[in-house]
Image (spheres, helix red, strand yellow):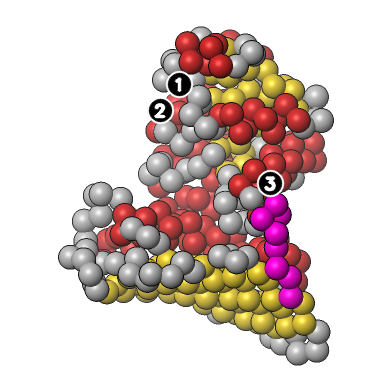
Amino acid sequence: MIKTGIVGINGCKEYIEHIERHQGLQLTGVFDPGFQTELLTHHYPFKVYYHFHEFLLDCEAIVFATTDKLILPLVHSAIKASKSVYLKGCHEFLADELKTISKLHAEANEVLQVQNKYFYHPAIQQALVRFKAISIIEIQKSVHKIQYLMPELRAQITMVLLLQKSNLRRIVVNSSTVFNQMPDVINLRLDFDNGSVAKILISAVDVDTFHSVKAYGYNQIHSIDLSLPRYTYFNGIDKFNHLYSIEEVGASTLLRQQIDAFYTHIITGKTPASSVPVEMAAQMVIDKVKERLKVCFSFF
């Protein structure tokens, strides 16, 4: 079994449950970068580490269950110590910081996986099996508050980069203001070297909740409604239509699938699709978006 430790007290409970239930993972203990050890020892009957160096020595794999920037030097240390690393997220890190992590990871040559709430969705995974030379991807997503515009745009960019393996050639962005002084609708177009195009619309003005992903290729149409959720595929002859249950797309199910994938990547040595280089590219796109909109998004 792979000795696995968790970093971070906030939100660690769900990771603890999945690791303890996994047949190939063994929970070593928890280290909290905020040193809230009294909370850990009071609530959980497992080893709580007070020194990260000791924690590193006892672990073969480390799950960072927090996205706080406090973990950045700890991530560096874990990678340098040749530990397999699972990150809950990278959105708090700057592009240069992600570049450093990516460089360290390339030198260590161990598994480094980043959690992604959309890529492992069963509708997306089922569509990937059928994807063939996709030329157009269209994504539309609503958010309830304007401060969620940029985080959600970044999440959709990451998903596009995971679906479309070609290099970016051009970025075109525009925005509109409907109810606020700040932009509340953002349109982004990504052109790739292979001629494919991705169009992303994020809106904070719609009352209805929607999140659709459509992909078009030669003789194929993929339609994914992540708000239902439903996946429809048509190739001119056959049609596939599936409505997913709550159990299939629940947060706990999606996290379990990603922990399973993390274990598989460690065992097989296969590079995870959801990785830091993809997150770095997504952050670089977001930086370009902010620059071109000429707006201060300091509250994001």
* Circle 3 or circle 2, nearest the eye: 3
Task: Of the two numbered discs 3 and 2 on the same chain, state the one appearing first in sequence.
Answer: 2
Residue 263 included in the magenta stretch of the image: no
Query: Few, some or many C-alpha atoms within 10 Å of disc 3 (few <14, some 14-19, many ≥20)?
Result: some
Can the viewer see residue 53? no
Q: Where is residue 287 shown, x and y percent of the image?
A: 34, 56
Alpha-carbon span between mark 3 and mark 1: 27 Å
Q: Which residues are magenta?
A: 241-248
Can the viewer see residue 222? yes
In the figure, 268 relative to 9: above or below? below
Query: Few, some or many C-alpha atoms within 10 Å of disc 2 (few <14, some 14-19, many ≥20)?
Result: few
Amino acid type at image mark 1: Pro
The residue singled out by tag 2 in the image is 70
Under circle 1, the secondary element is loop
Residue 246 included in the magenta stretch of the image: yes
Under circle 2, the secondary element is helix
Task: Of the two numbered discs 1 and 2 on the same chain, state the one appearing first in sequence.
Answer: 1
Q: Quadrant of residue 60?
A: top right
Residue projecting furthest to the left: 181
Q: Quadrant of residue 63?
A: top right
Task: Of the two numbered discs 3 and 1 on the same chain, state the one appearing first in sequence.
Answer: 1
Q: Where is residue 162 shown, x and y percent of the image?
A: 59, 60
